[in-house]
Image (cartoon, rainbow, N blue to C red):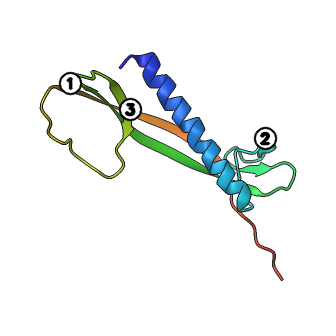
C-alpha cells in the first residue's frame, strides 16, 4: 500500500468514527470535540467548554494498524486494526504485513447530572 493511501484511509476512518460517536453523543447529552472547547490558561492540560464551562476529558488513542497486501488474485491492499487478536491466519499465497502506530486524541464532554 502506498503511504498516501495509508494516510488517506487512516484519517478518513478516524473522521468517520468521530462522526458516528458525535451522533451518539448528541442523543445522550454528551459532546465530542465541541467548537467551543478551550484550553485553560492557568493549567495547560485542562480543557473546558467555553459556553457551559463543562470540563472535557481527553481520550488518547494509541492504535497499532497493520497493512496487509495479499499476493492472491485480487492483489488488493487493505488497512485493518487488530485490537485483541494476535496472529495471522494461514492462507495460500504470499502476504506482506506492515505494522504502524497511530496516536491521536479526541476531547469528550461526558453527560452531566443535576443535583436534586
Residue 110 horizontal/vertical position (percent): 69, 60
Label 2 – label 1 distance at C-alpha: 46 Å
Label 2 – label 3 distance at C-alpha: 30 Å
Residue at horizontal 21%, vertical 44%? 87
Local crowd at mark 3 within 10 Å, few (<14), some, or many (≥20)?
some
Secondary structure beneath label 1: loop
First in sequence: mark 2 or mark 3?
2
| Residue with the mark numbered 1 | 72
Q: Residue furthest right?
A: 51
Can residue 61 be seen here? The reply is yes
Secondary structure beneath label 3: strand
Above or below for 107 versus 72: below
Residue 79, labelled with which disc? 3
Q: Give the mark toward the camera: 2 or 3.
A: 3
Question: Based on the displayed image, in which of its 4 quarters is residue 37 positioned?
Answer: top right
Secondary structure beneath label 2: loop
First in sequence: mark 3 or mark 1?
1
Can residue 30 be seen here? The reply is no
Disc 3 to disc 1: CB gap under 8 Å: no
12 sits left or right of 26 in the view: left
- Quarter of the image where the C terminus is located: bottom right
- Viewer-nearest residue: 32 or 57: 32
Local crowd at mark 1 within 10 Å, few (<14), some, or many (≥20)?
few
Q: Residue furthest left?
A: 92
Disc 2 to disc 3: CB gap under 8 Å: no
| Residue with the mark numbered 2 | 35
Residue at horizontal 65%, vertical 55%? 24
Residue 53 horizontal/vertical position (percent): 83, 55
Amino acid at each position: 500500500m502506498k503511504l498516501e493511501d495509508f494516510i488517506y484511509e487512516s484519517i478518513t476512518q478516524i473522521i468517520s468514527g468521530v462522526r458516528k460517536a458525535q451522533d451518539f453523543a448528541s442523543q445522550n447529552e454528551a459532546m465530542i470535540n465541541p467548537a467551543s472547547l478551550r484550553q485553560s490558561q492557568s493549567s495547560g492540560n485542562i480543557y473546558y467548554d467555553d459556553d457551559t464551562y463543562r470540563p472535557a476529558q481527553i481520550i488518547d488513542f494509541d492504535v497499532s494498524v497493520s497493512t496487509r497486501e495479499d499476493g492472491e488474485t485480487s492483489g488488493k491492499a487493505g488497512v485493518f486494526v487488530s485490537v485483541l487478536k494476535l496472529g495471522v491466519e494461514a492462507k495460500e499465497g504470499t502476504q506482506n504485513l506492515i505494522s504502524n502506530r497511530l496516536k491521536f486524541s479526541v476531547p469528550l464532554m461526558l453527560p452531566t447530572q443535576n443535583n436534586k
